Image (spheres, rainbow, N blue to C red):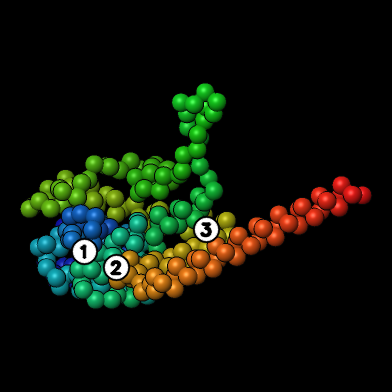
């Protein structure tokens, strides 16, 4: 793991990602709300070059601008976990619309590959001794399940608000970022083997529009929406009544015959 000390070094890392055409990107924030919290640390993992960690509080807003250029470069695949959150932070902090391109979210990829699967765990019910538990798609779970790597689960947003951030915390974040590219390779193969390319493509391309809608909101004509809901409900009631009438007629015909 290499800690970035200057904007010039950071520019070199971003340029390296552009040359290779792929990178893992991990962002650590001071909270969960992209409008109220900030991005503190950015970790970029490059194939065969390790992980570079940059304290964005120290490098300033120019470092975010460099990151924005990378996110809009469709020649470079950016591998993230729960990309929607990271992209929302980037757009909110830069204060402008970003055209995110070629983002691979390993959490979404995992959800696509494991759709319909669940774990059976013991239940306290005597009637049903087992209950379904959804598959865990957290980065910690994915790293352990697919790579055999155990990651620290104890990182708290509060710790990223401190000045300065401890080296232990930075190393932990870098280790998390280091798992992104191997996980991408794993899920890319699972998607191919299970013929899920089309589904995965739709899910991944939907990330940017969802980020835009969640940050900016969408216009809704409340009156028209309520009117439409009432019309659909009335149509449903009529359909049920018609079905019941048909059933009565059918039963009557049987009784008479």
**Distance between mark 2 and mark 1 Cα atoms:** 8 Å
Task: Check disc 3 and report its element: helix, strand or loop.
Answer: helix
Q: Eyeballing the image, is 113 above or below 220?
A: above
Task: Check disc 2 and report its element: helix, strand or loop.
Answer: helix
Label ID, residue 191 = 3
Identify which residue, 237 or 152, lies in the foreground.
237
Identify which residue, 155 or 133, lies in the foreground.
133
Label ID, residue 215 = 2
Residue 177, percent from left and from top: 29, 54
Identify which residue, 128 or 23, lies in the foreground.
128
Give the farthest residue toward the right.
Answer: 257
Identify which residue, 28 or 11, lies in the foreground.
28
**Distance between mark 1 and mark 3 Cα atoms:** 34 Å
Q: Residue at point 33% right, 41% down?
A: 150
Badges 2 and 3: C-beta atoms under 8 Å apart? no
Residue 58 visible? The answer is yes
Q: Nearer the viewer, mark 1 or mark 3?
A: 1
Q: Eyeballing the image, is 154 above or below 195?
A: above
Badges 1 and 3: C-beta atoms under 8 Å apart? no
Task: Check disc 1 and report its element: helix, strand or loop.
Answer: loop
Question: Pointer 1: what residue?
Answer: 35
Q: Residue at point 89% right, 49% down?
A: 256
């Amino acid at each position: 793991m290499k800690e970035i000390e200057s904007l010039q070094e950071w520019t070199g890392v971003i340029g390296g990602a552009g040359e290779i055409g792929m990178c893992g990107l991990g962002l650590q924030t001071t909270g969960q709300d992209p409008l109220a919290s900030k991005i503190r640390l950015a970790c970029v993992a490059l194939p065969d070059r390790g992980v570079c960690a940059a304290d964005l509080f120290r490098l300033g807003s120019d470092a975010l601008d460099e990151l924005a250029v990378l996110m809009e470069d469709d020649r470079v695949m950016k591998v993230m976990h729960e990309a929607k959150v990271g992209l929302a932070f980037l757009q909110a902090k830069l204060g402008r619309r970003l055209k995110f391109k070629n983002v691979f979210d390993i959490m979404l990829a995992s959800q696509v590959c494991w759709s319909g699967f669940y774990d059976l765990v013991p239940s306290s019910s005597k009637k049903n001794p087992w209950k379904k538990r959804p598959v865990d798609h957290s980065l910690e779970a994915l790293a352990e399940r697919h790579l055999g790597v155990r990651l620290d689960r104890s990182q708290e947003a509060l710790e990223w608000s401190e000045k300065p951030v401890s080296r232990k915390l930075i190393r932990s974040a870098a280790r998390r970022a280091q798992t992104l590219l191997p996980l991408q390779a794993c899920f890319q193969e699972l998607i191919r083997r299970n013929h899920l390319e089309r589904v995965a493509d739709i899910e991944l391309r939907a990330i940017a529009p969802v980020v835009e809608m969640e940050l900016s909101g969408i216009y809704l004509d409340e009156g028209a929406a309520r009117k439409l809901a009432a019309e659909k409900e009335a149509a449903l009631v009529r359909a049920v009544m018609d079905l019941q009438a048909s059933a009565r007629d059918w039963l009557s015909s049987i009784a008479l015959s």
